[in-house]
Amino acid sequence: MKDSKRKVLIITYYWPPSGGAGVQRWLKFAKYLPEFGWEPVIYTPLNPEAPAIDASLERDVDEKLRIIRRPIFEPYSFYKKFTGKKGAINAGFLTEDASGKKTFKEKVSIWIRGNLFIPDARVFWVRPSIRYLSKIIRSEGIETIVSTGPPHSMHLIALGLKKRHKIRWIADFRDPWTNIDFYKDLMLTSFADGLHKKLEKRTLQLADEVICIGQTMAKEFEKISGRNIHVVTNGFDDEDFTHTDSNDITKDQFVILHLGSVNKDRNHQVFFKSISDLCVEKKDFNDKLKLIFVGKLDFVVIEDIEKFGLKDKTEIVSYVPHNEVSRYLEKADILYLPFNNTPNSKGVLTGKFFEYLAARKPIAAIGNIDGDANQILRATKAGRMADFYDYKTFKNIISDFFDKQFPDFNLLEVRKYSRKNLTKLLSSILE
């Protein structure tokens, strides 16, 4: 470790105690960056619209880490009053009622969000953040900043700072911008669509370096920007996991576990039909089967659980703190990994996927077999994937795993995705 560390200002909307997938990436980078000669300074909202509260994540926050929290104005309070909705806003368009349809008020709200708040509802935080952070940059001599999105308003803050100061800017994309799966649901006018694409291209071209989480996304960004894009995937932190001999199903239950939310695009009939048919064909499978879903479920998932006669075999847990995830992983015999059946499916690489790798349990996936995730799955030999409509292959995967025909994990390949190794790669880009 170097004695004198250089400061890097990290602009992120998501930070503990906010929970959910958006927090993990830069929480872990900030944890390990000091080992590679960098001192992170975190800039984050004081009052964000958090998808969940997870105080357990604060154990990864060093007490010496400087965190700057500033108030943010967001229009979500007006949205909730207008639509009558309560709780956190669901950005993934997950439906939780029987109709599965948006009300007129919800449609109006989505149109306003897509066309008036560009790139997102955090846009009101951009100008005050530029003014405030300009003072910090001048007074503390910060020479490097990182913005991570979504929300992509964080990139606009960094863009404003880049224009004002001689500063190095790294733009990090955890998800696509205009190619994200729900972009089509925002009911954009041609003007709004054009503005989104203009801001996306400007960000990609004006940042000193651009990072994203997968090869497919990198190629898409390279096509837009005409420049080289770095890939630093998501990963897993060894300190979050314990490992036991997982491939033993002599116990009374055979547990298939899914972690995370399931919206309609990740709800695959192939999964439920395969499981249901195996219950009929294999008495031992039927006697031992238990499905566990940890996370929010779209109403269509609940319907299919009942439709395929699996309600009595299913446990649904709405949310667990991140420090309890390993406990659920230890229960599992198979980890179920469904990917979004959307036009951008080839490039989807969820953070959950890498935590599945760390658990060293066989992964049964449904997704784009030509996509980034399946390339990693094959290289690590951590599981098998079936295409979205390939019932026969997926059924065989589950049957083989039940019969103890497990993949032979390539642990050396898996190690590439440890958070510490990924932070080392990040630090070389910061250089």
Image (cartoon, rainbow, N blue to C red):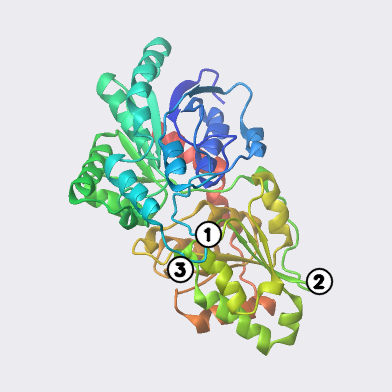
What is the three-letter code of the residue carrying label 3? Gly
Select label 2 or label 1 by which is in front: 1
Rendered position, 152 above or below 143:
below
Q: Which residue is mark 1?
A: 96
The residue closer to the viewer here, 271 or 346, is 271
What is the three-letter code of the residue carrying label 2? Lys
Task: Tell me which label, 2 or 1, sits earlier in the chain.
Answer: 1
The circle on residue 27 is none
Mark 3: which secondary structure? loop
The circle on residue 367 is 3
Task: Tell me which label, 3 or 2, sits earlier in the chain.
Answer: 2
**Quarter of image, res 65:** top right
Determine crowd level at label 2: few under 14, some 14-19, many 20+ residues with C-alpha closer than 10 A: few
Residue drawn at (42%, 63%) of the image:
101
Residue drawn at (61%, 85%) of the image:
277
Task: Tell me which label, 1 or 3, sits earlier in the chain.
Answer: 1
The circle on residue 251 is 2
Select label 1 or label 3 by which is in front: 1
Dividing the image into 4 quarters, which one contains the N terminus?
Answer: top right
Mark 1: which secondary structure? loop
**Quarter of image, res 428:** top left
Residue drawn at (44%, 49%) of the image:
91
